[in-house]
Structures are given as C-alpha cells and as structure tokens.
Image (tube, rainbow, N blue to C red):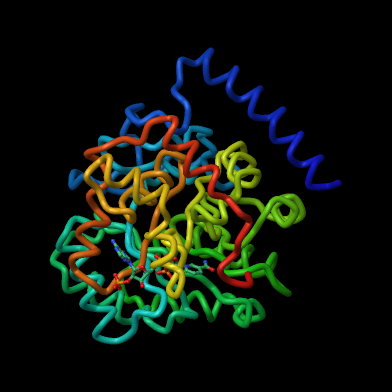
Amino acid sequence: MKRLYNLMLVCMLMVTLSACGKQAGKESIVDAAAGQDGETGNDLGGGEEQQPQIQEGGNTVTGDITFDFDTKTVLLNSGYEMPIYGIGTYSLTGDTCVESVTAALDRGVRLIDTAHMYHNEESVGEAVRNSGIPREEIFVITKLYPNQFDHPEAAIEEALAKLDIEYIDLMLLHHPGAGDVEAYLAMEEAVADGKIRSLGLSNWYVEELEEFLPQINITPALVQNEIHPYYQENDVIPYIHSLGIVVQGWYPLGGRGYTSQMLGNEVISEIAAAHGKSSAQVILRWNLQKGVVVIPGSSNPDHIQENTELFDFELTEEEMERIGALDRGEKHDWY
Ligand SMILES: NC(=O)c1ccc[n+]([C@@H]2O[C@H](COP(=O)([O-])OP(=O)(O)OC[C@H]3O[C@@H](n4cnc5c(N)ncnc54)[C@H](OP(=O)(O)O)[C@@H]3O)[C@@H](O)[C@H]2O)c1
C-alpha cells in the first residue's frame, strides 16, 4: 500500500516537474544535448579549477541533473561535475585493480567506483597517482561500510589515507545500518573541512530515503542502487530524480555469474546487431538514456575500451521499451 502511495506521489511530482521544465525550456533527463553552463567545481575538461557555488545550509540544489552527452557529464547538486560512465572495481584487487584502473584511465575513463569493502582503495589511489592525469580531471567514489558507522571520523581518515589522492570526490554510505545518520553527519563535517566534495547513499530505496532525508542537512548528490534489465527500479528512479539526486546503477551487466545470460538475451542481442554494437554497449546505453550513470566492472582492456564507446549510437523509443519489458524484478544480490 505504501509502495502504491509512493508511486502516486512520484507521478504527481513528475507531472509538476515536467510542467516546470517546459516553462523553463529545459529538456527531459533522457534528452541528450542540453548543456550545463560550466559553473562547476571540478575540472573534468582540463581548464582552470572553479569553486562550487555553495548556498547557505550546505549544498547547491540545482534541480538540473540532465545528462550532457557532449561533455559526458552530469552536474551534481553539490555543484561538481561527474562523468556519466566509469569503471567499477568490486572484486578487483592488488595488481589487477591497478592495471584495470590504469587501462580505464588510458582509455579516457575518468570515473572510478571503489569502497572500503572492496579492499582496493590503495590500488585505486596508486593508479590515479601514477596516471599523470591532473587530479581534478578524475572523479573517485568510495564508500563507508556499516561496520564503520560507529567510528565514521576515523573511517573517513582511513579512506583518505588509503586512497592518498588529496580529497575524495564523492563518499557514499554503502548500505543502511545502525548509526547511518551519525555517519552521514560526520561526512557532512568532512565536506566542510574540504576532505570530501560530495555525499551520497547506496542501497537506499523510496522508504529508506523518506525516513533518512529529514535527518540530515546536505541532500545526497547521488544514490547508487542495483539496476539492470532484469531489475529496473522503474518506480524508484523517477522518485530519486524528482529530488534532484543523480542515480547510478551497480551490476549494470547483471553482475558476475549473470553476465552471459544477460548479454545473451535475445532482445538485447537483436538490438545490438541492429546497431552494430555489443550487448554490453546496448545495456549501458539504455541506462544512460534512462538517466542512470554506469560503472561496469572489468579487468579486460578490450571490454574496458568497449564500455567507453557508448556515444556513437542512440536507442529508439521502441528499443528502450523492448528492453524495459524485460524487467522481472530479479535482484542479483541481497542488498
Ligand atoms: N553499492 C553496492 O552495493 C555495489 C554492489 C555491487 C557492485 N557495485 C559497484 O558496481 C560495479 C559494477 O558491478 P560489477 O562489476 O560487480 O558487475 P557488472 O559490471 O554487472 O559485471 C561485471 C562483469 O561483466 C564483465 N564485463 C564487463 N564489461 C564487459 C563487456 N563489455 N563485455 C562482456 N563482459 C563484460 C566483466 O568481465 P571482464 O572482467 O572479463 O570484462 C565482469 O565479469 C562494481 O564494480 C562496483 O564498483 C556496487
């Protein structure tokens, strides 16, 4: 019942927002070309660094999280720009992680997702430092795990020390758990101290967000949840977007153990053949056109390259709908 109520609320919000968007002459989130004005805090383009415009009360809620398909970035509500595609590093450790992140950086990837729980923050930091790419051009996400929520200040220092890349672009709470509000408030302090630039959550859905958001001061810039053709979160994504929060999907290719059935799906393979692209590229592009940032994991340089080539084709409305029809509420992990 609560889910139905949420859904109705979301629909009402979307109607209102869509009316506002039309008045302001803005394109919808799936429209590709709307440009951001470049008044952002980081420098993913390589020019001089600017400071984000921070309003009193903590963060800048711009309300415009339209993907810019020219710059391949999105403007977060914190005032910082973030790439809309990157590499995930779950299960990549040691040299494999360093080599995979290096391969990604060499191929133009500028968004890296790590976490305390992946035991590879040192390796990610090493690859970033050794890349020769200016720090401002790379965007690193890491996460605090629930077993760190009772000592968040020390956990943030630990992440900073392990990464050793001056600051953290975006820190998430990995899962809801005891002490999550206090941990988030500690991350807010770290933002004020310049240690972290933007904040977010992972594995928070509608009910969790409704309960959590009134207890904190800085609206999350991003929520990272499981999203793939078999688990689409079609009610959750519009709700998060309506709050001006960017959505990022984990397990975009279904996650290890599920990728071959996902990539071999008949509908996806057919659409891929029609565009002369791979199934992986079609799934990643489908996410982008839904306004979902993608962070596929890979240790294969050919796959890493393939996962960057998402901007020379576009799925039609009908193709988007055909993939949309594959949703079967099938989660590939417990959280
Ligand atoms: N917040 C959370 O709770 C949470 C949970 C899970 C994951 N994550 C994040 O999300 C990221 C993505 O998830 P994931 O890496 O576990 O799963 P995934 O991206 O869905 O799938 C990774 C698998 O896909 C294969 N692959 C990648 N690109 C491919 C391509 N172009 N063609 C064919 N196969 C390809 C990889 O194999 P190869 O190595 O051979 O390319 C790997 O086996 C993680 O790395 C992590 O950063 C977050």
Q: Quadrant of ligand 1?
A: bottom left
Q: In the image, what residue occupies the spot 27% across and 74% down?
A: 299
50 w.r.t. 17: above or below: below
Classify residue 215 by image quadrant. bottom right
Residue at image point 60% right, 80% down = 148
Q: Is residue 70 left or right of residue 32?
A: left
Position of residue 93 measured from the top left corner of the image (x, y, whole percent): 34, 84
Give the x, y percent position of residue 297: 35, 68
Residue 51 seen anywhere in this rendered image of the structure: no
Left or right of 206 on screen, residue 270: left
Direction right: furthest residue: 1
Q: Is residue 293 above or below residue 238?
A: below
> Residue 52 versus residue 94: which sits nearer the camera?
94
Question: Which residue appears at 46% of the width and 69% of the height?
Answer: 258
Q: Say left or right for 39 vs 172.
A: left
Q: Position of residue 199 (x, y in %)?
A: 52, 57
